[in-house]
Image (cartoon, grey):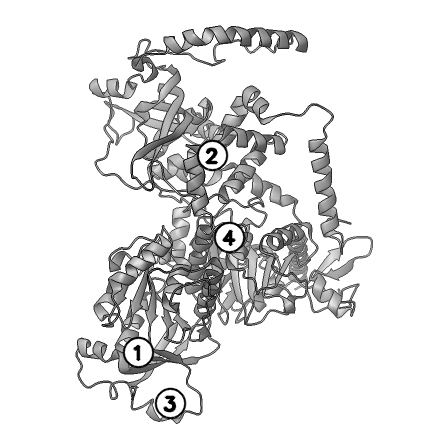
Amino acid sequence: MTDLLNELGAAHEQQQFGILDEYSKREIRRAILTAVAVPGYQVPFGSREMPVARGWGSGGLQLTLAVISPSDVIKVIDQGDDQGVNAVNLRRLIVQSTKVPETTTASDASIVQSRHRIPEDGLDEQDILILQVPVPEPLRGVERDMRELSRMHAEADYSKMWVSLYEDKVRNGVITQTTGYPCLVNDRYVIATTPIPRWDIPRLDQSPFLTLFGAGREKRIYAVPPYTAVTPLTFEDVPFEVEHTPGASCSQCGSNKTFLVEIPGPTSRWVCSDTDWCERNSGKA
Amino acid sequence: MGYSGARGGIDAIEAAEKLVRRKRLNAECEWVSPQQIVGRLRLAVDRVMGEAGIWDEELTAIAIRQAEGDLIEAVHLLRSYKSTLPRFAYSKPIDVDELQVVRRIVPAFRNPPGPQLLGRTTDYTGRLLELTSEQASQEESMLLSSLALTEKAETVDSIASAQDTQPRRLLETLREMDLLVDRRRDDDPEPFDITRTPARPPASRSARLSSMARAETGALVNQWYRNILGPDGYVHEVTLGEVRHGYLALSIEHPLTGNTISIGMVRVTEVEAIEDLNGIDEQRDRFDIGYGLCLGHNEKKAIAMANLDIACHRDNGRSQLEQSLLLTTDGLDSSGFLEHLKLPHYVTFRSMVERKLAVRKSRTSERDS
Amino acid sequence: MKFLTLAPIDANYTFRTMLQTLSRPGTIEALTLSTDSQCIPETALMLAVIDVETKFAVLSSLEEIDAKVWARLLSSASGAPQTELPKAEWVLSFGEPSTEGLNSLARGSAYEPEGGCRLVVACDKLSRLLNDEHDINHDINHDINHDINTDNSTDASQLDASRTSTTISLCGPGVNGQTNLRVEGLSESFFSTLAKINNSFPAGVDVWLCDQLGHLAAISRSTEFIVMRSKEVVA
């Protein structure tokens, strides 16, 4: 009996490229195509269990493995940092199983898998940005029932979201959404921009590159095609605000026109979150 | 700092991995073989097989050993291994009446059709920690294994008759007594495959059952406790019909000859729960039945499953019970997401701090104006 | 061909080309397959995405192409089950599909946009219109109905489709402003039917066009397009 099973197994073994089998890849590829055809719609897909845990980038990893080809160059970042431990682990998994060359320079990369940041520059028309998404549902804060959420997206009924933003503004004086700001894509679907900072959102609008969003745990894929309208939800008289701390600049390269993160202490210091950009800007690359 | 430092990332990871591997492989004690884990920790092995959705005792033991006893971690190892295996056949549908029981009880009746077979259970034994010396335990173990060789012949004879190993279901008797709602269908819908499509409410019964079959045991028990007995739901009158532990034969169609061939057996736990119907729009002169089935010997899971199956059916979308079952009971999803909080979140945190300051600034300017 | 085969590496490249063209509707990309694969480009598109879990169908409006033969080849190579047109998730059409056929394709719904059919159409030639082609400016106001074969019946326009060239102007997600695409082998009727089908976005049908030189272009259901002109191609 074991012989028969072994035979059948051997007969099905295909020359794989990477750790995802060809069936899984096709499933993910089909979902990607649907996501691109309907910008902003969360496409359900049969998310496979990956060597990284749910919540740790299993969705982003599946997208990368389904998409990557031998002629690509991969960059993986976490919080903008190529050396973040989770980015290192993911990059190692990808490179070991696909042998695709890796880089830290965004302009050399053709695929960037990222957790929580868009590289400050370097992505153009030939590139694909893959974002890791912990919670793909932008309306999660205003509605709990999944059936109702489904209806809201199907009918483009985002009224509850608008009310919640209004109440936020009234209660707090400003809209307090931090990262993952809800945006309207192609004037139709509201998406969770994952926890990318508000700083990065303008770069999604009419971008030259394709952005894919992968939520492995919740089993959803969505996309923002290039040259597509992405507008943060806000009111006419309430301008969209990005993160900005007056007077702050990077203590390594001096920049004040990139997204900075704080090094806490008696006197605050700031550094660029995009370590690759920072290095190049400091002339140390 | 090596956590997310400038060039320390890969070095830090590799150092951590070496440490784990060294401590795991070189723990200052004897080596543990997979056979020992299967032989001595069978219930852990069964639980992990059920949650991984894979039947392979030795592989599971290896996963438990590699995970150093973290059972959810072991489930992860097995499920991601499963992702690399090709799926090349589906078994033929199994009639659960063919289950060969090694344990079978029917709480609903004192003398049901077929035997009440306590089998291997500690249900009625006092929970007393045995503190006999290691040496005495091992001597007893050796004595018992030599006795077992002579006992074997008897045991086989005593569970010989088909009536005993495949007892008639209580369900059949209840139907004959005209006590049950009949929910049997004429059609034969394709079962929902949760490994291929994520199940979302409103879902088919097969989607709910298969989600629960792979659910984390503790999560399912907690869901049961909250909904059947606890704050989230209303109290159900629960009586168990069947609680069975036994073997099921698996067969597939031979890819070339088309003949049905047996490929082995799996061991499962199966429960039928009798539900008292007392709702306004229900058939109050009858009972209904909930069903639970999972791999391995895991009675609490199968019982919870059976109760939640019928509770979901009766709830009929009124509450979010179905959503809870489908979306919050998977061990990998829940613990993976929980533990992801350990990842760097400083981009989000910086954004949050900025908003706090913005709120304060707006209050100040409001006061000033 | 006795059998079709698409090596995993080629499936990968084919998918990337499909993704690139769908992300940028109207853009033309070349599809090249390695010697490990044995299939014509339009079938490569199907084999890159279908498997045991996807239902598909094959159509042909070309006399020399037998849809049934190709359906069997695709099914053997992929394990994908064949089905009737309205139930198919992926459809390959050799030549222009009939209006009836197009209209019968699954469109999905607002609740389930993923139910929309994906259509691969093998046409004759894909090209872009360059700005210095005076035809564009000259014909825009005269075109549409004047240059098509004067017989207005659907059958006739299908028969003549292989000698028809239609130019469409596209805009929408993926298109930087506006772009043009000239398709030889598809009539205006195809595009006007498609436009109507995709009117109830997010339901709709996504289309890949594959020409005889292995060039690919795509029209997403989110794309807005209008027919600029349509005329017979002089042989």
Is B61 located above or below residue B151 in the figure? below
Say which mark, if any, is on residue C185: 1
Q: Is residue B286 left or right of residue C90?
A: left
Q: Which residue is mark 2?
A: B54
* Dot 1 or dot 3, earlier in sequence: 3
Identify the residue shown where x is 57% and y is 65%.
A71
CA separation in Å, label 4 and label 3:
48 Å
Looking at the rendered structure, whether the residues under marks 1 and 4 are on a common chain is answered as no
Mark 1 element type: loop
In the rendered structure, are the residues bearing label 4 and label 3 in contact, judged by CB atoms less than 8 Å apart?
no
Identify the residue shown where x is 46% and y is 23%.
B297
Chain containing mark 2: B
The number of discs equals 4
Q: Which residue is mark 3?
A: C136
Q: Position of residue A267 (x, y in %)?
A: 82, 56
Three-letter amino acid code of the residue under disc 1: Gly
**Which of C195/B319 is in front?**
C195
**Which of B60/B305 is in front?**
B60
Q: Which residue is mark 4?
A: A16
